[in-house]
Amino acid sequence: MNIFDDDDYMSTTPKDNYFSIAKTANQNIVEMELEKLFRRLAVAEKMLEERGLDEEHERLISASVVDSDIDMRVDSLFIELVGNIVTQCE
């Protein structure tokens, strides 16, 4: 089965593409890629905490909930996840 059979692939958001592919891809690969992403997040949080930016970090997160740059970064992460999953499922 080709995970790109859906004609709407190019007309959807990176988030939609991820969830569509994650449903049909090998679940072990999906879980492994999500774990890698969460580990990166944990490392970034640890680095911020070690630099004493914990309270500032929380304030910045709250202030950045609606931010086009953050939205683009989230889209990039979804695109990266899709690419990582697809290349391993081929």
Image (spheres, rainbow, N blue to C red):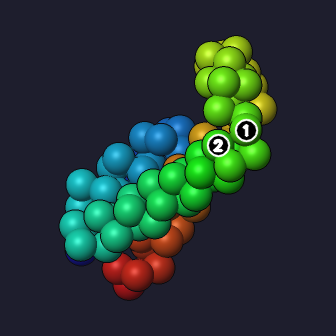
Quarter containing the C terminus = bottom left
Query: Is 59 rendered above or below residue 43?
Result: above
Percent x, y of residue 30: 32, 65
Q: Amino acid at mark 2?
A: Glu
Q: Residue at x 42, y 51 (%)?
A: 18
Quarter containing the N terminus = bottom left
Q: Residue at x 73, y 25 (%)?
A: 56
Query: Is 31 rendered above or below residue 61?
Result: below
Q: 2 or 89, which is in the foreground?
A: 89
Label 1 Cα crowd, 10 Å radius (few <14 / some 14-19 / many 20+): few
Residue that label 1 marks:
52
Percent x, y of residue 65: 62, 19
Percent x, y of residue 5: 35, 62
Q: Residue at x 33, y 49 (%)?
A: 20
The secondary structure type at the circle numbered 1 is loop
Residue 49 numbered tag: 2
